[in-house]
Image: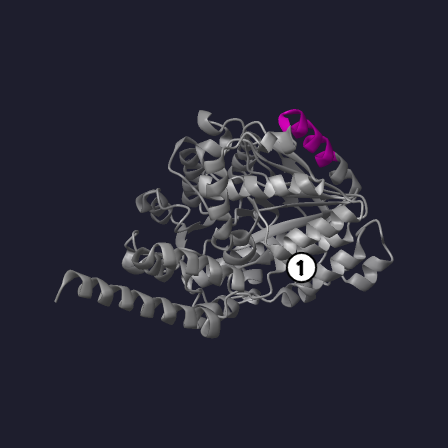
Amino acid sequence: MSAIEILAIVIGCVEVLNLVLLFFMIFLEKKKPQSIIAWMTILTFLPVIGFIFYMLLGSGLSLRTRRMIKKKQLSNFDLLKKYDWRGTLADLKESPELITDIQFARFCFGKGAYPCLYNNVKIFNFGLEKISALKEDLLNAKESINIEYYIFADDRVGCEVMDILLKKAKEGVRVKFLYDSVGCKKTKKRFFNQIKKAGGEVAEFFPPFMHIRAINLKLNYRNHRKIVVIDGKIAYTGGINIRDDHMGMKKRLSPWRDTHVRIEGSGVIPLQNIFLNDWRYATNDKHKTTDFIKEGYFPSPTKKGDTTIQVLTSGPASTSFDLKQAFVKLLTNAKKRVWIQTPYFVPDDCVYEAIKIAKSSGVDIRLMIPKKPDKKVVYLPTISYAEEMVNLGVKVYMYNGFLHSKTIIVDDDKLSIGTCNIDNRSFDLNFEDVVYMYSKKINREYSRQYEEDIKNSVSADKQYFKRYSFFNRMVQAFYRLLSPLL
């Protein structure tokens, strides 16, 4: 058999594999057309490697995994019944000072994000501020610490937090520690297993096949959440992971600008619920809502402040894309302004059109992204879309450093802080959470920070993007084609 004949057979086999994958994507997995086009591009240019990539990254979560995740969801309504909250939309209609946008609140309520009244909210704009407060709260823990991070490194700041967790576990505080397999792939397991030896519990979300780090069949689906709940009374969430660069300690990405939020009040309960849902799935825990209540994980909330919040989640086990819908809803509801901060901006057609419509309606839309990239594969399409935003009349700012904040200021009364970026990965593939705050005071406070960030940014106009070379623009265009997978 000649070399040409062998080559023809190989090419034929590859084409058959591509057709089989195409069949699966269209008829069984029912992927969106944008994702199918992106995968077919990869399979065309990298036929064999593309097939391997698809096996590792492209295939969706199995039906069994989806069912198990849903099965492990605790009942929000059991908690509502226990506390007999006044957090129904009918009650809140009569109290506009508690929720300033009843229409958006109704949307979130329909997605399971019930209103949580009277919270004390503290916003951190830099990693060292957040980590200082977190360490103090951890040291003061009396009953339980539930901690979940996408990235938890064994570097300086990671060791400082770990030492506190070990100390509290040895004192008898119940410590549950959950980490993401992909985000923590560079951190040795023995670092986390110290908690077990101290009397706590540790679990890995979507662990690799046969515990071999190089083989993770769920590599594409990451638990991107950063949640800490202490004694069921204090909760943290936002963009700041436990790693030195998030504290601004790495020169290459410095200054590092990020946002996190600390909550006291009834808003702790949904974040505790999210953690325990993830924990139950990762560990196959059989506890029910009533069991966790009896064990003190849901103490009766006290009135701590004047901010009403709702906590919304999303993940690949759902097909409703709740956080993307919420973002579109914020855009379409906005009357005056939508100011966005995100490290990665890769909108799909739905989000792009919503921005375009809001801008055409006279809404002041501003977009702030980093000037320094951490991942070029996502940053290049981000720059491409940012240029299009400028052409639409959106004010675009390039932060002089690395901006990792995931925030949205809407009008004068709403603020969103969470773990979710404005890209397909966050909206469709990752497990995420977002806190929506209804408060003119909190809105003003963060608006001032946004304006300070503008002072440390470059305003990007049409001339700004002309400095990119033809080759760079070609690479941007190629990565944009793959944007549904990024």
Please, what is the dominant secondary structure of the magenta stretch?
Answer: helix
Q: Amino acid at mark 1?
A: Ala
The segment highlighted magenta reads: 445-458
- The answer to which of 214 and 21 lies nearer the viewer is 21
Query: Residue 455 colored magenta?
Result: yes
Place of residue 181 in the rendered image (x, y in percent of width and height, measured from the top left): 39, 51
- The answer to which of 234 and 242 lies nearer the viewer is 242
Query: Residue 415 colored magenta?
Result: no
Residue at x 19% of width, y 62% of height: 4
Residue 55 appearing in the image:
yes
Place of residue 273 in the rendered image (x, y in percent of width and height, measured from the top left): 57, 58
Residue at x 37% of width, y 60% of height: 54
Is residue 372 found left or right of 320 in the rendered image?
A: left
Residue at x 13% of width, y 64% of height: 2
Residue occupied by mark 1: 113
Picture quarter containing residue 384?
Answer: top right
Picture quarter containing residue 21?
Answer: bottom left
